[in-house]
Each structure stands twice: as structure tokens, then as C-alpha cells.
């Protein structure tokens, strides 16, 4: 089974898929809003052949609060978004 990771930073987004010894990475500039970020992640996941059967881990440059929303003042696309809920809904 492949492992999928998403690294969201202040200036770029990286999506990686490891399967055995193979590591495939996609990288792009950080979008300015949540909708564009989700679309970018979806495009990268599709290009890497990731399906809804994969587990996805995501790192963000901030804090996920008890409510599930993100506190990410230097990353407006994530600030105030409940990432777990939103990504689960979008990517099953």
C-alpha cells in the first residue's frame, strides 16, 4: 500500500506518494484561498494515482485547535478551516 503526505507551507505545497522504494513528489506555489488549495491538492493526488482507499497525512504551519479548525496566521488559505472535515468530505 502507498503512503501519501501533504506538506503545506507559507509559500509552497508538496504532495508526495511513497510506494515501496519509489517516491513521487508534486510541488506548487501556495494558493491564496482554500478552494484553490483543495483543487491543487486534488490535481496532485490524481496525477500521483491516489485513490480514496489511501490514507493521507497533512502537515500545516500552525495549530489544529480542539474545534478542528486551523490557526495558521501566515497561511490565509488554511486559517479558520476545519481541514480534517473538509478533506474527508472532498476525498472520502
Image (cartoon, rainbow, N blue to C red):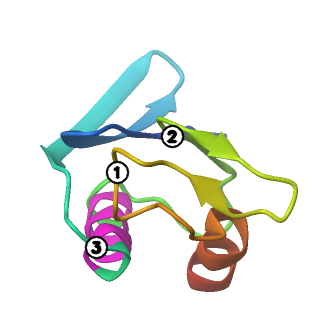
Task: Give me the residue at 47% from left, 59% from top.
Answer: 50
Residue lying at the far front of the rendered structure: 73
Q: CA distance from mark 1 to mark 3?
A: 9 Å
Q: Nearer the viewer, residue 9 or 80?
A: 80
Q: CA distance from mark 3 to mark 2?
A: 15 Å
Task: Answer left or right for 16 relative to 61.
Answer: left
Quickly name the residue at label 3: 33
Disc 2 on helix, strand or loop? Answer: loop
Which numbered tag is attached to residue 75? Answer: 1
Residue 5 position within the rendered picture, expressed as x and y whole percent measured from the top left: 51, 38
Quickly name the residue at label 2: 60
Task: Answer left or right for 43 relative to 82.
Answer: left
Chain part drawn in magenta? 36-45
Residue 54 position within the rendered picture, expressed as x and y whole percent measured from the top left: 65, 56
Q: Are marks 1 and 2 in contact (CB under 8 Å)?
A: yes
Residue 7 position within the rendered picture, expressed as x and y whole percent measured from the top left: 42, 37
Amino acid at each position: 500500500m502507498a503512503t501519501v503526505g501533504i506538506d503545506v507551507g507559507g509559500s509552497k505545497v508538496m504532495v508526495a506518494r511513497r510506494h515501496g522504494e519509489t517516491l513521487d513528489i508534486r510541488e506548487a506555489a501556495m494558493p491564496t484561498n482554500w478552494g484553490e488549495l483543495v483543487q491543487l491538492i486534488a490535481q496532485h493526488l490524481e496525477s500521483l494515482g491516489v485513490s480514496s482507499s489511501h490514507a493521507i497525512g497533512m502537515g500545516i504551519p500552525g495549530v489544529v485547535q480542539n474545534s478542528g479548525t486551523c490557526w495558521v496566521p501566515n497561511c490565509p488559505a488554511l486559517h479558520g478551516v476545519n481541514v480534517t472535515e473538509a478533506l474527508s468530505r472532498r476525498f472520502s
